[in-house]
C-alpha cells in the first residue's frame, strides 16, 4: 500500500556570514539544531548560502571585482570535503534532511566554480549533488555551467524530493525532468536580491513576484509541495560591498527588491506565512496525500500528456575536465615516486 508521509519542513530565510564559509557553517549548525528542536524533518537553505551570493557581479565591471572573486573562490566548498562531512554529521545527529546551497570549487582549477545544491539525508548520506545548469545573467561572470547529473529525484522516507536553483525554476524542461521522476516535494533556492537596474530607474526585477510565479507554477503543474528558501541581506554583506565598491554600489543593493521564502501546495496556493525582509526559520506542515486529488485533473507525466507526440531526453552524465587513459601521473601529494610514474 502506498504511504503518504506527513511532516514539518523549515525554510531558512537567513543571511550567511558573507564570504566566511566556516562562520556561515557555524550559523547553519545552530539553525539546523533549532529546526530539529521544533520538529522539522527537513530544512532548506538559500542559494549559495556557503559562502554567500556574489551580488557584486551586478554592481560593478569585472575589472573592479578581482579581489572579491578571489575571496569567493578561496571560500568555495569541495564536494566531498570537510564542509560536507560536517553537514552530514549534523543531519545524522539531529535526524533531519538538509538542502544546502553552496558555491563549489574543484581541485582541477582554482578559478572554476559551480552554483550547487546538496541534499543530505537524515542518516548523513549525500543523496543528491546538483550543479546549476546555466548561471543566470551576471552570474555567468562567477560560475561555470553545470550538467544534468543532479537532475535527480531522490526516494526518501519523506517522499520523492527534487531541487532546482533560482532561475532553473523558470526552465520548463528542467522542471519536467523532475516531474517525470515522480517528484512530490520540490525545493527552490534563491538569493537575497537580484538587482537589474539602478534605484533611480523604474523596472527593477521584482524578485519576490518572480519567485511567487515560479513556485506556484511548478507546484500547480507538478502537483507537488514547493518549499522556497531565499536569503536575507545583513550587515556582513553590506559592509563588504561598501568597502569594496563604495556607497553607490551599496545603495543599489539596499534598494533592490528582496526575495521571499514560502511554501506552496499542490493546488498552487501559498500555505501559511512568508518571510521577506527579516531573518527567521519558516515552518510549515505538509501531507503528501494532498498531491493525489489534483493529479486527477492534470497529470502531465501520466494520462494528461501525449508521449507519442512529445519526447524528452535528459543526459545526466557528469562532465569531467578530461578523461585520462593509462598510469596515473606523478604527484608529490600521492606519495608516489618518480620511478612509479615512469613507463
Image: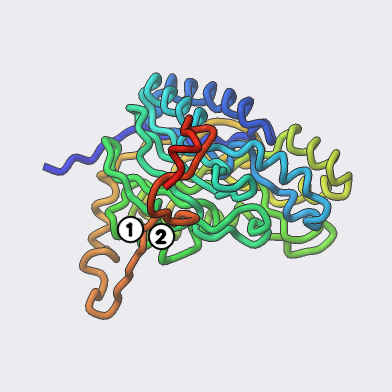
Name the residue rendered at 58%, 58% in the picture. 135
Q: Nearer the viewer, residue 125 or 331?
A: 331
Q: Nearer the viewer, residue 278 or 30?
A: 30
Name the residue rendered at 35%, 39% in the picture. 127
Name the residue rendered at 43%, 44% in the picture. 328
Query: Which mark, residue 144?
Result: none
**Which element type, helix, strand or loop, lies under badge 1?**
helix
Q: Which residue is mark 2?
A: 175
**Which element type, helix, strand or loop, lies under badge 2?**
helix
Q: Residue furthest right?
A: 247
Answer yes or no: is residue 264 visible. Answer: no
Q: Nearer the viewer, residue 272 or 253?
A: 253
Q: Residue furthest left?
A: 1
For the residues labelled 2 and 1, say whether their Cβ atoms are less than 8 Å apart: yes
Q: Position of residue 284 (x, y in %)?
A: 43, 36
For disc 1, the neighbor class at 10 Å (few under 14, some 14 to 19, many from 20) is many
Residue 22 vertical placement versus 160 (above, below): above
For disc 2, the neighbor class at 10 Å (few under 14, some 14 to 19, many from 20) is many
Query: Which mark, residue 179?
Result: 1
Amino acid at each position: 500500500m502506498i504511504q503518504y508521509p506527513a511532516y514539518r519542513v523549515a525554510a531558512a530565510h537567513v543571511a550567511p556570514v558573507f564570504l566566511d564559509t566556516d562562520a556561515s557553517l557555524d550559523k547553519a549548525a545552530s539553525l539546523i539544531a533549532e529546526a530539529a528542536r521544533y520538529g522539522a524533518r527537513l530544512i532548506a537553505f538559500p542559494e549559495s548560502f556557503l559562502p554567500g551570493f556574489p551580488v557584486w557581479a551586478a554592481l560593478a565591471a569585472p575589472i573592479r571585482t578581482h579581489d572579491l572573486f578571489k575571496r569567493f573562490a578561496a571560500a568555495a566548498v569541495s564536494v566531498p570535503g570537510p564542509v560536507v562531512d560536517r553537514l552530514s554529521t549534523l543531519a545524522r545527529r539531529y535526524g533531519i534532511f538538509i538542502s544546502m546551497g553552496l558555491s563549489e570549487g574543484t581541485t582541477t582549477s582554482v578559478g572554476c566554480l559551480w552554483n550547487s545544491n546538496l541534499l543530505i539525508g537524515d542518516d548523513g548520506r549525500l543523496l543528491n549533488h546538483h550543479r546549476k545548469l546555466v548561471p543566470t545573467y551576471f552570474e555567468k561572470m562567477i560560475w561555470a555551467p553545470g550538467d544534468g547529473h543532479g537532475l535527480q529525484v531522490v526516494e526518501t522516507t519523506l517522499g520523492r524530493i527534487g531541487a532546482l536553483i533560482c532561475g532553473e525554476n523558470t526552465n520548463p524542461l528542467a522542471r519536467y525532468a523532475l516531474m517525470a521522476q515522480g517528484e512530490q516535494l520540490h525545493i527552490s533556492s534563491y538569493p537575497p536580491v537580484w538587482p537589474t537596474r539602478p534605484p533611480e530607474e523604474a523596472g527593477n526585477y521584482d524578485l519576490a513576484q518572480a519567485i511567487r510565479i515560479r513556485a506556484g507554477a511548478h507546484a500547480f503543474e507538478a502537483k507537488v509541495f514547493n518549499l522556497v528558501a531565499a536569503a536575507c541581506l545583513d550587515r556582513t554583506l553590506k559592509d563588504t560591498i561598501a568597502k569594496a565598491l563604495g556607497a553607490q554600489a551599496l545603495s543599489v543593493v539596499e534598494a533592490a527588491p528582496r526575495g521571499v521564502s514560502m511554501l506552496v501546495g499542490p493546488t498552487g496556493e501559498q500555505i501559511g506565512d512568508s518571510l521577506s525582509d527579516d531573518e527567521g526559520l519558516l515552518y510549515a506542515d505538509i501531507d503528501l496525500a494532498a498531491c493525489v486529488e489534483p493529479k486527477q485533473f492534470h497529470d502531465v507525466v501520466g494520462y494528461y500528456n501525449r508521449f507519442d507526440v512529445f519526447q524528452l531526453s535528459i543526459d545526466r552524465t557528469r562532465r569531467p575536465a578530461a578523461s585520462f587513459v593509462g598510469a596515473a601521473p606523478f604527484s608529490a601529494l600521492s606519495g608516489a615516486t618518480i620511478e612509479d610514474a615512469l613507463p
